[in-house]
Amino acid sequence: MATTALVAHVVVAKFAWHLPLYRQAQMFAGQGIVLDRSTLVFWVRRAAW
């Protein structure tokens, strides 16, 4: 389960810094954290809800 800080980071990077989710997934993978893009989409949807 993601922390609120991680979800906030993803949302801010997407909307404030215009960083697409596929690129964020690549950045996480570069740090050894494997996250599917659909997981990031789910987090963004939940945060918006």
Image (tube, rainbow, N blue to C red):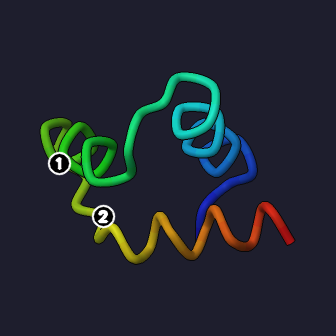
Residue at the location (63% across, 62% down)?
44
Q: Amino acid at mark 2?
A: Leu
* Residue 37 % position (x, y): 33, 67
Q: Quick check: 22 left or right of 44?
A: left
Residue at the location (33% across, 43% down)?
24
* Residue 16 % position (x, y): 63, 26
Q: Earlier in the sequence, mark 2 or mark 1?
A: 1
**Circle number at residue 29:** 1
Q: Secondary structure at mark 2?
A: loop
Q: How many marks?
A: 2
Residue at the location (86% across, 72% down)?
49
Q: Nearer the viewer, residue 21 or 3?
A: 21
Contact (CB < 8 A) between labels 2 and 1?
yes
Q: Quadrant of the N terminus?
A: bottom right
* Residue 40 % position (x, y): 47, 64
Q: Amino acid at mark 1?
A: Ala
